[in-house]
Amino acid sequence: MAKPNLTPLEDALDHLLSEAPVVAQIETVALADSLGRVLAENHYVPADVPPADNSAVDGYALRKQDLHGDRPIPVSARIPAGEAPKPLEPGTAARIFTGSEIPEGADSVVMQERIEVTESGILVQAEVDEGQNIRRRGQDLTRGDLALAKGTQVRPNEMGLLASMGVARVAVLARLKVAILSTGDELVDPGLPLGPGQIYNSNRFTLMGLLTEAGCEVVLCETLRDKREATRETLQRAAEAADLVITSGGVSVGEEDHVRAVLEESGSLSLWKMAIKPGKPVAFGAIGGTPVLGLPGNPGSVLVT
């Protein structure tokens, strides 16, 4: 059970999601640039995939009823991928390749490893079942079906699926713009020398990675010094530039923790202290209508929260 004044985790998550910023702007990008983006519309299958029955292997298309013991079957056609085949002549087989369309009249494909080629034709050296090694029309996608729903984040497999439907450009939601503010006079950017009492700012890069991975656009990264007015000015400026502001540090009860105080004075504070450890002093509020999520300064707490 949560201690008094500590918000249970599930309640905090519900509150955060209810107040989360919503992006309504839509933009169109090339399919090659869609990785990580969020679809802004439903995608329905425009045509069956595959568009016709085709061979799943390199081999020979034939009718099972034409197999008679050790009698060779003559080869009457060769069907490369990308060509429309003529109907299969009765009593014959057709050389066929992976992805090639099955000729009318054939009901099976025997892989070439199970075939002996002779001067008189082919000898099948395996049991044959009707339909074997045939990928049926519409087996992957059926025309009119919902392939991808609005709100789906595009991963490599979604890119391939869209490509298989002939989609070249994709309507996606604009990226959520996020500002990252790190607090503390002790923070130094990597690459610069450390002075007495200073540490490198690792939280900025942790948050940049997490946000980029989530498909967000980081529009501002700054370090806040431990001054109340400077904190207020930078928070207000960040709120004007972003859909969401995330801070690290400055949300606990220390004399130099100004983020929570500024939220209370210049905006609103609707959540403070969650029943988790590490990460208890999480704060959430808004400035000028822009949500502000205040995380603790400890790097482990930043990852957790």
Image (tube, rainbow, N blue to C red):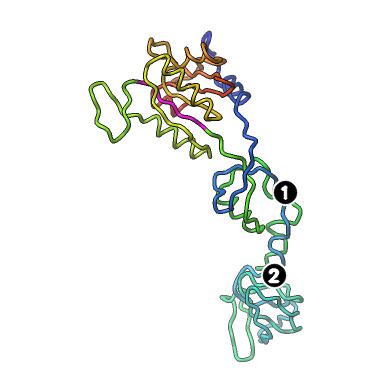
Q: Is residue 166 visible?
A: yes
Q: Residue furthest top?
A: 4
**N-terminal of the two: label 2 or label 1?**
2
Query: Which residue is at 68% across, 65% downward?
Result: 135
Residue toward you, 109 or 145: 145
| Alpha carbons under labels 2 and 1: distance apart | 33 Å
Can you tell which quarter of the image residue 53 is in? bottom right
- Which residues fall within the magenta stretch? 178-184
Q: Quadrant of the N terminus?
A: top right
- Tell me if mark 2 has few (under 14), some (14-19) or many (20+) residues whose alpha carbon lies within 10 angstroms of its own: few
Report the residue marked by disc 1.
146
- Compare residues 287 and 247 and report the one nearer the observer: 287
Tell me how many marks there are: 2
Q: Secondary structure at mark 1?
A: strand
- Apparent side of residue 8 relative to residue 94 in the rendered image (left or right): left
Percent across and percent down for residue 165 are: 67, 57
Q: Is residue 136 above or below residue 182?
A: below
- The answer to whether residue 127 of the structure is visible from this angle is no
Q: Position of residue 234 (x, y in %)?
A: 45, 22
Q: Residue 129 shows which numbered tag? A: 2
Q: Position of residue 26 (x, y in %)?
A: 64, 41
